[in-house]
Every structure is written in C-alpha cells, then in structure tokens.
C-alpha cells in the first residue's frame, strides 16, 4: 500500500529513490505483481501493488519505475477530485498540496497495463454517513470513474480504511473486491475479499524491514479483525 511517490515532506510520500529501491528489492526477491482478478491463479510469489488517492506523481514518478521492473499496479482514485487536488486534507496539520491524476492520466495509466479502482466519491469516511450517503459514495464513484475511463472497475478502497457492515455490504453489491488499511499479508483462506488487508510501505523501510514484512509473519500479527468495524 502506497500513496504518493514524491520527494516532498508529506507523511504520505515515499521518495522516488526509496520507491525504486523497494521495487528493486521486490524484483530481486522474485515477486510477481498481479491484478486483483489474478488472485486465485497459480502464480509464484504474487504481490499486489496499490496506490490510494490517485496522486499525479503516481504517473510521473511511480509509473516509469513500475515499468522498469515489469510490475503492474492498481490506483484507487476519488471520483469528485479527478484532475483536482487533495482538498480533503486541507486543514490537517500535516497537509501538503498535491495534484491528482486527470482523466487523460487515468487513460494513460491504463494504457500502460495498470488498473484503476474507486476510493469513493469525495473521500469521506463511510462510517460517518447515513445509508443513502454511503450508497451515493460507492455507486456514483463507480459510475463516474467508468464513464471517465470507458471501462469497468471492480475494486474499492475504503477511504481512511474505515468500514462498517453496511458499507461493506454495499461494496459487495457492485464491486468484486474491497481493500482496507488493516495490516497483514493477504491470505485467501483467512481474509474475505471485501476486507483485504494490506502491508504499509513507508519512506524509511530498510531491506531488512521489508524482508520481515513480506516473508515472515511480522505483519500478520498486527491483523485485528475488530479494526474493520470502526
């Protein structure tokens, strides 16, 4: 799980150099990046690389590195802010202005073999909304993004990782997969496909720490199903 790939001071950013070092490690370790629709295929050492929010730097800085190492990725975008900026973060103490992907950027991203998913309509926590508002965020974001890119999307990333039973059941109605911010490696025998956990990739990860995150149960012991129902 990534957000921004940038040399700025945002707490959401992984520097360009560190991102390349991390992907180089994944490549040398034999990992093969897949799409969500390939989860159940017999692929050696599969890994899914995701980006939340849809920052412009994903296509400027991350895409060339992804292609260099023959990796693919899914980017989750906020439909109301395509071509805009991260206004939902304004007012936060750690706010850093960031441009978001445009419609043309999304199409270019897809043309390079990458995938797009929804991160909601307006980046609101679904747990703070009534049922009608939840449906609006989930249904409308899918329609807007699909109309924008001209193809179907089937994966949803819960804004802020916050979920309740109603929002998860609503996501089930129109998406095949839902991803969370709950920390763990994804185990298809343990985790439901609408509560897929992820491994957080930060700016200060050593290769030793990445090894522990990906190849041992280090990240799995942080899994707490109660976190799903905030």
Image: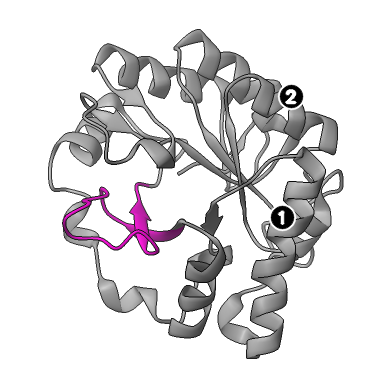
Magenta highlight on residue 182: yes
> Which comes sooner in the sequence, label 1 or label 2?
1
Residue in view at x 19 percent, y 54 percent: 220
Residue 190 locus on image (x, y percent)? 18, 60
Residue 61 locus on image (x, y percent)? 65, 22
Q: How far apart, in angstroms, are the residues tagged by discs 1 and 2?
A: 17 Å
Which of the colour schemes (rainbow, by chain, secondary structure, one colour) is used? one colour
Tell me if I can see residue 171 in this picture: yes
Residue in view at x 80 percent, y 48 percent: 147
Q: Quadrant of residue 87?
A: bottom right
Is disc 1 placed on a helix, strand or loop?
A: loop
The image shows residue 3, relative to residue 65, as above or below, that is below
Of residues 131 and 54, the one nearer the viewer is 131
The image shows residue 87, relative to residue 134, as above or below, that is above
Magenta highlight on residue 162: no
Is disc 2 placed on a helix, strand or loop?
A: helix
Rate crowding at label 2 as few (under 14), some (14 to 19) or many (20 or more) other CA atoms within 10 Å.
some
Residue 132 locus on image (x, y percent)? 69, 87
**Residue 143 numbered mark, or none:** none
Residue in view at x 74 percent, y 34 percent: 106
Tell me if I can see residue 96 in this picture: no
Residue 77 locus on image (x, y percent)? 68, 49
Indicate left or right for 111 with 158 as reference. Answer: right
Of residues 150 and 26, the one nearer the viewer is 150
The image shows residue 161, relative to residue 146, as above or below, that is below
**Residue 78 numbered mark, or none:** 1
Rate crowding at label 1 as few (under 14), some (14 to 19) or many (20 or more) other CA atoms within 10 Å.
many
Indicate left or right for 12 with 211 as reference. Answer: right
Q: Which residue is mark 2?
A: 108
Q: Quadrant of the N terminus?
A: top left
Residue stretch in magenta: 178-199
């Amino acid at each position: 799980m990534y957000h921004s790939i940038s040399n700025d001071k945002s707490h959401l950013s992984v520097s360009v150099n560190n991102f390349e070092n991390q992907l180089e490690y994944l490549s040398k370790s034999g990992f093969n990046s897949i799409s969500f629709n390939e989860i159940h295929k017999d692929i050696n050492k599969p890994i899914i690389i995701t980006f939340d929010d849809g920052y412009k730097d994903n296509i400027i800085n991350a895409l060339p590195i992804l292609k260099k190492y023959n990796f693919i990725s899914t980017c989750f975008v906020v439909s109301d802010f395509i071509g805009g900026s991260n206004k939902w973060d304004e007012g936060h103490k750690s706010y850093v202005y960031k441009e978001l992907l445009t419609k043309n950027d999304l199409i270019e991203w897809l043309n390079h073999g990458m995938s797009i998913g929804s991160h909601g309509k307006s980046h609101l926590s679904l747990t703070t909304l009534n049922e009608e508002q939840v449906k609006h965020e989930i249904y409308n974001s899918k329609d807007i993004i699909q109309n924008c890119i001209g193809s179907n999307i089937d994966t949803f990333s819960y804004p802020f990782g916050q979920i309740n039973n109603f929002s998860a059941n609503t996501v089930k109605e129109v998406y095949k997969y839902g991803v969370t911010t709950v920390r763990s490696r994804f185990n298809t025998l343990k985790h439901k496909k609408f509560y897929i956990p992820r491994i957080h990739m930060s700016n200060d990860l050593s290769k030793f720490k990445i090894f522990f995150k990906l190849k041992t149960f280090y990240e799995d012991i942080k899994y707490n199903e109660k976190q799903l129902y905030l």
